[in-house]
Image (cartoon, grey):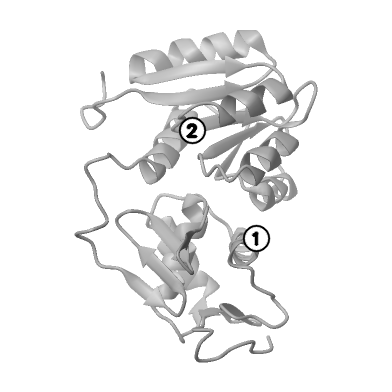
Amino acid sequence: MNSSDESHARRVLLVDDDRKFCRLLIDYLKPLGYDVKAAHTGPEGVDKALDGDWHAVILDVMLPGMDGLEVLKRIRTAKSDVPVLMLTARGEETDRIVGLEVGADDYLPKTFSTRELLARLRSVTRRAYRPPSIQAISDDEIVVGPLRILPAAHTAFLNSATLALTPVEFDLLLTLARSPGRVKTRDQLLEEIRSRDYEVFDRSIDVHVSALRKKLGDDAKCPRFIRTFRSAGYMLMDPLVDPGMPA
């Protein structure tokens, strides 16, 4: 393998109806240490995504049978947190936001260069992949009320139930949990996320926080965990101390 830091091939599912494009991408990624399998329809993409142990899914938006956004919804509904890199023929910010709202980890227009795709793919797989030798037992944990976070294991629990968070959502929760009771500005959150190699923009922070709230069972109007401070940012609260505070 070309990458000395990867002792095992990264298993990637490519969901795209353009078979020529799939063959070209598979031929490009294989020598770089990626084991890429393809699906060419939306329903096939859902089935394969949920039936395999993937390090990442590359998902086209325009698919026969079911569009990529619906495919992604079904993957996330099934509680899979596999990193998903979405491809679209359109690159407008609104399209990217829709993908992020559904649960995408990154977004690329189909005008991408292979080098850009490789950089994004390495980034999402590096963030999500944890070798089996890493154990949470030896790592510090962060506890805020009923929330328990194990940073090194990239795992969070709510009342002992595991939270199915995307890498971005986990890092946002971790950043807020490290400063409970203190407001973190959007700029501060952006800086924290950027330090982990994410490509983010101002509006995506709000989208990811909204998704995180839903997974926490939180109500933005009367939050128990994440309180919004308009024109300022967000604060993680301990619901045992400040239950049901109005936003």
The N terminus sits in image quarter = top left
Element class at badge 1? helix
Residue kind at label 2, given as amino acid type: Ala
Element class at badge 2? strand
User: Looking at the image, is 27 positioned above or below residue 171?
Assistant: above
Foreground of the two, 219 or 113: 219
The C terminus sits in image quarter = bottom right
Could you tell me residue 54's position as x and y percent? 46, 30
Please tell me the numbered disc located at residue 242: none
Crowd band around label 1 with a 10 angstrom C-alpha radius: few (<14), some (14–19), many (20+) = some
Residue at 45% in and 63% down: 157
Residue at 69% in and 49% down: 93
Residue 135 visible in the snapshot: yes
Figure quadrant of residue 211: bottom right
Crowd band around label 2 with a 10 angstrom C-alpha radius: few (<14), some (14–19), many (20+) = many
In this view, which residue lies farthest toward the front?
A: 160
Residue kind at label 1, given as amino acid type: Val
Report whether 30 appears left or right of 47.
left
User: Looking at the image, is 236 positioned above or below residue 60?
Assistant: below
Could you tell me residue 83's position as x and y percent? 51, 40
CA–CA distance between discs 1 and 2? Answer: 21 Å
Earlier in the chain: of badge 1 and badge 2, it is 2
- Of badges 1 and 2, the one in the foreground is 2
Figure quadrant of residue 232: bottom right
Q: How many marks?
A: 2
Please tell me the numbered disc located at residue 56: 2
Please tell me the numbered disc located at residue 207: 1
Could you tell me residue 133's position as x and y percent? 21, 42
